[in-house]
């Protein structure tokens, strides 16, 4: 029986760099399992995007390795073309602040041990994660 998780991630920054936030949502079989949002301090948009992905993959890794989630594959959806292109190996990672984050993503992928498909979508197709980032940035 094949079971897949779909993860929507987003990160954003005011004034780039500026106050930043990350968010992710996790769905299994179309049902929301978990959502997360948080402020991450001062960061660029790209760092916020990677932070959201790392947080989501860490959550999945912990649930998969503890057998709380039984899945056979993972789809990650993001509106960051840079992030998706870098983790798919299409673009090289050149920025010094992004290199360690990219390495952390690759380490998490190995720890999860499942096929992971990264897909870029337009912001309109990532509205829930985008809304969570905005909530985190505007909350007190």
Image (cartoon, rainbow, N blue to C red):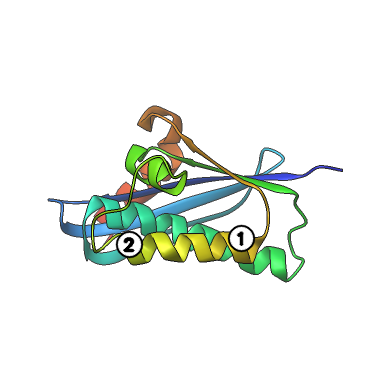
Farthest residue in the right direction?
A: 1
Q: Is residue 127 visible?
A: yes
Give the quadrant of the C terminus.
bottom left
Mark 1: secondary structure: helix
Q: Is residue 15 above or below residue 121?
A: below
Mark 2: secondary structure: helix
Q: Which residue is mark 1?
A: 60
Q: Position of residue 45 (x, y in %)?
A: 25, 51
Camera-nearest residue between 10 and 81: 81
Q: Which residue is mark 2?
A: 99
Between tags 1 and 2, which lies in front?
Answer: 2
Q: Earlier in the sequence, mark 1 or mark 2?
A: 1
Q: Position of residue 89 (x, y in %)?
A: 44, 45
Q: Quadrant of residue 47?
A: bottom left
Q: Position of residue 106 (x, y in %)?
A: 50, 60
Q: Is residue 119 above or below residue 33?
A: above
């Amino acid at each position: 029986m094949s079971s897949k998780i779909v993860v929507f991630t987003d990160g954003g920054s005011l004034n780039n760099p500026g106050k930043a936030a990350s968010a992710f949502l996790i769905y299994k079989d179309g049902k929301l399992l978990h959502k997360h949002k948080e402020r991450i301090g001062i960061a660029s948009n790209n760092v916020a995007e990677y932070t959201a992905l790392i947080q989501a993959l860490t959550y999945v890794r912990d649930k998969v390795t503890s057998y709380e989630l039984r899945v056979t594959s993972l789809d990650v959806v993001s509106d960051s073309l840079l992030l998706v292109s870098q983790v798919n190996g299409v673009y090289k990672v050149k920025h010094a602040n992004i290199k360690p984050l990219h390495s952390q993503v690759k380490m998490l992928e190995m720890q999860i041990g499942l096929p992971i498909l990264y897909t870029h979508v337009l912001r309109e197709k990532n509205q829930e994660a985008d809304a969570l980032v905005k909530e985190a940035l505007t909350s007190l």
